[in-house]
């Protein structure tokens, strides 16, 4: 067996590489290094672009289906377009002047006051049941489902159900006859009662949405606060005003905004149940009839713009009167 001398290569070691081979290996390693550096740079660019690509898709859909139709709405509102002709003649602010001066258009807006008043009853009912069912209550899950179920029903179905409820000799009149009411009013035929009947139907349908919002907000309040209040001797009423209501103030403000905007733009219930007859014609129903029945798309667009600005103004006033203050219960 051969003994390797110090500094000598092992017997099975490869021979020394020639200069051309070493040059080729150096070139390959340099190109590989440049490839790795290029891949890292490309990956960094994609890493920064990925959030913007996702954002671009959402913003593109928002512009296409929201802001572009809104821009067209403003354009149509200053024309006399009938929805069919290719030509659109500019008329300036004539449509807006007609909205506020025509007795058949703007006074209809005051029908929304019935729904506006009913919306506060809706908020009060939702807040009451949300407060009760947020504590330990027997069959609380069942009652939560009962309260939220009407909101899941389609608006057309709700309209037909209450149409049979309010019709002469219907369910409501039958129940009232059990208590001795022999001459009930025309719930949908009397102009003095029809709007209250329709507003009550809206309250029944939309109370569930406010109930869920209030219930989620109340359950997010730490239970330690209730325990401390009970130790101090506070009853449920005192806990509501000292803990619950301040803790859900923002949700209450949001619900008020939704209720007001919904009452100003109510459409489904009166359109299905009465079609706007007997003094139940709302501003939105009148707008649709102006556009599609009377072929005055320009005037209808001006009515829609007026409704939009009224909702924005009412929301702004509500935010000023009840500012969104941060509440810290701890």
Image (cartoon, rainbow, N blue to C red):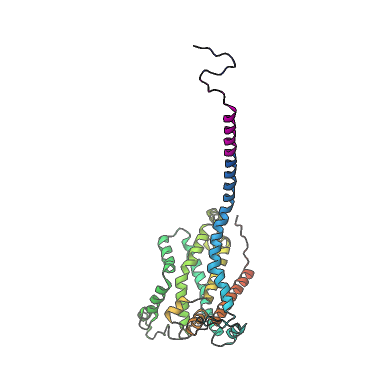
Q: Is residue 22 magenta?
A: yes
Tell me which residue sits at (44%, 82%) in the image. 275
Residue 298 seen by the camera:
yes
Residue 256 seen by the camera:
no
Q: In which quarter of the image is the C terminus?
A: bottom right
Pick the residue in front: 287 or 62: 62
Q: Is residue 134 left or right of residue 311?
A: left
Pick the residue in front: 31 or 242: 31
Where residue 110 sits, quadrant-wise, is bottom right
Q: Where is residue 253 in the image (x, y as percent from the top left)?
A: 57, 67
Q: Residue furthest front?
A: 20
Tell me which residue sits at (57%, 33%) in the image. 24
Q: Which residue lies furthest to the bottom in this view?
A: 103
Q: Is residue 4 magenta?
A: no
Where residue 254 sits, quadrant-wise, is bottom right
Pick the residue in front: 44 or 235: 44
Q: How many marks?
A: 0
Q: Position of residue 222 (x, y in %)?
A: 54, 54
Dominant SS type (magenta): helix
Q: Position of residue 4 (x, y in %)?
A: 55, 14
Q: Where is residue 313 in the image (x, y as percent from the top left)?
A: 61, 74
Per the rendered image, the range of residues in magenta is: 12-32
Q: In this view, does 193 lie to the left or right of 48?
A: left
Tell me which residue sits at (58%, 62%) in the image. 246
């Amino acid at each position: 067996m051969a003994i390797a001398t110090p500094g000598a290569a092992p017997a099975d070691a490869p021979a020394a590489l020639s200069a051309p081979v070493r040059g080729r290996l150096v070139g390959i390693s340099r190109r590989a290094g440049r490839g790795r550096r290029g891949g890292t740079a490309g990956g960094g660019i994609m890493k920064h672009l990925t959030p913007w690509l996702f954002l671009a898709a959402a913003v593109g859909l928002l512009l296409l289906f929201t802001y572009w139709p809104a821009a067209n709405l403003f354009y149509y509102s200053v024309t006399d377009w009938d929805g069919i002709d290719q030509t659109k003649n500019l008329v300036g602010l004539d449509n807006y002047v007609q909205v506020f001066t025509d007795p058949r258009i703007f006074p209809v807006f005051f029908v929304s006051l019935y729904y506006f008043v009913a919306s506060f009853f809706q908020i009060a009912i939702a807040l009451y049941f949300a407060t009760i069912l947020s504590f330990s209550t027997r069959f609380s899950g069942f009652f939560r489902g009962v309260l939220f179920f009407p909101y899941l029903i389609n608006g057309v179905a709700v309209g037909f159900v209450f149409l049979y409820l309010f019709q002469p000799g219907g369910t409501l009149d039958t129940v009232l006859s059990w208590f001795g009411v022999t001459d009930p009013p025309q719930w949908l035929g009397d102009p003095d009662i029809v709007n209250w009947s329709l507003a009550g139907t809206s309250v029944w349908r939309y109370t569930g949405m406010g109930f869920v919002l209030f219930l989620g907000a109340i359950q997010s309040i730490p239970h330690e606060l209730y325990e401390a209040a009970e130790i101090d001797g506070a009853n449920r009423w005192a806990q509501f005003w000292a803990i619950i209501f301040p803790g859900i103030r923002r949700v209450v403000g949001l619900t008020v905004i939704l209720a007001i905007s919904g009452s100003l733009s109510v459409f489904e219930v009166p359109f299905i149940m009465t079609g706007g007859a007997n003094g139940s014609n709302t501003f939105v129903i009148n707008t649709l009839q102006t556009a599609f029945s009377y072929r005055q798309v320009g005037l209808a667009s001006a009515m829609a713009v007026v409704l939009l600005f009224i909702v924005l103004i009412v929301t702004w006033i509500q935010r000023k009167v009840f500012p969104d203050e941060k509440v810290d219960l701890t």
